[in-house]
Image (tube, rainbow, N blue to C red):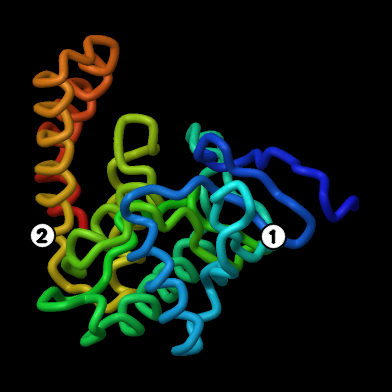
């Protein structure tokens, strides 16, 4: 591979402007980048190896990260994860949270949250997740919010995710492996987050998104009790 050639990255849900250059990834920076860079340095220093390493800023002002070999599943629901992949993802999420608990970056919060954990931001080698990517939204927060968002994405909770019984079992699996016992809190967080997203789209006048999010809210409200009862 030409070490100077820029190759747009595909797979997952790729942030615009992200390219591979040799053994590195180049990404646009933003106002939140200093925190992200500090977090990636911290994770590297503490031995958490399931995140890209921050290598600096290139001549175009883009951040330079290590490229991680593997596959990021597509985010269109066409690649449901196996139980083993869910187990390994839950273990890695717990390890990440433990690494940031009590850190200066977490401040007064429980942990540092990734805030967008899901298959689309996870690099897999077979059944094993080897890294979380796209840390742009990372910030201090709670275990519940980061875990619940991850469960929603990894399990694919919603109308497209299969039977309620199957979703409830997989939800329970991830929470058990992580070590989280309050299943009701996870389901309630997902429902509240979807309602909040719908309200944001309504305020912003994003009319194309409204039917999608109304359907998602309707589904979770209709099936939340079943998801909790079946766990």
Q: Position of residue 103 (x, y in %)?
A: 25, 85
Relative to 225, is 118 on the left or the right? right
Which residue is at a point 52% across and 51% down the rendered structure image? Answer: 81
Q: Position of residue 190 (x, y in %)?
A: 18, 47
N-term mark: 2 or 1: 1
Identify the residue at the far right of this view. Answer: 1
Q: Pointer 2: what residue?
A: 185
Relative to 3, is 174 on the left or the right? left
Q: Dot 1: within a 10 Å radius of its alpha carbon, few (fewer than 14), some, or many (20 or more) residues? A: many
Identify the residue at the far top of this view. Answer: 207
The one nearer the camera, 210 or 156, is 210
> Residue 14, relative to residue 82: is it above or below?
above
Q: Position of residue 207 (x, y in %)?
A: 22, 10
> Residue 227, relative to residue 114: is it above or below?
above
> Residue 148, relative to residue 47: is it above or below?
above
Which residue is at a point 58% across and 46% down the rendered structure image? Answer: 73
The one nearer the camera, 130 or 58, is 58
Relative to 88, is 72 on the left or the right? right
Say if mark 2 contacts mark 1, CB within 8 Å: no
Q: Nearer the viewer, mark 2 or mark 1?
A: 1
């Amino acid at each position: 591979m030409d070490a100077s050639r820029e190759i747009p990255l595909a797979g997952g849900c790729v942030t615009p402007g992200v390219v591979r250059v040799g053994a590195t990834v180049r990404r646009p920076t933003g106002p939140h980048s200093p925190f992200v860079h500090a977090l990636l340095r911290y994770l590297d220093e503490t031995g958490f190896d399931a995140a890209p390493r921050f290598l600096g800023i290139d001549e175009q002002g883009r951040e330079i990260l290590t490229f991680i070999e593997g596959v990021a599943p597509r985010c269109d629901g066409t690649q449901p994860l196996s139980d083993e992949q869910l187990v390994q993802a839950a273990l890695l999420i717990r390890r990440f949270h433990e690494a940031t608990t009590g850190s200066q970056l977490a401040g007064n919060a429980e942990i540092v949250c990734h805030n967008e954990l899901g298959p689309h931001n996870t690099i897999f080698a077979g059944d094993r997740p080897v890294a979380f990517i796209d840390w742009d939204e990372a910030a201090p927060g709670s275990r519940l919010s980061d875990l619940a968002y991850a469960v929603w994405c990894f399990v694919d909770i919603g109308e497209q995710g299969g039977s309620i019984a199957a979703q409830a079992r997989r939800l329970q699996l991830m929470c058990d492996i992580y070590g989280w016992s309050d299943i009701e809190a996870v389901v309630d967080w997902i429902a509240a987050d979807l309602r909040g997203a719908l309200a944001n789209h309504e305020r912003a006048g994003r009319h194309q998104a409204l039917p999608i999010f109304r359907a998602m809210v309707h589904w979770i409200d209709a099936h939340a009790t079943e998801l909790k009862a079946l766990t």
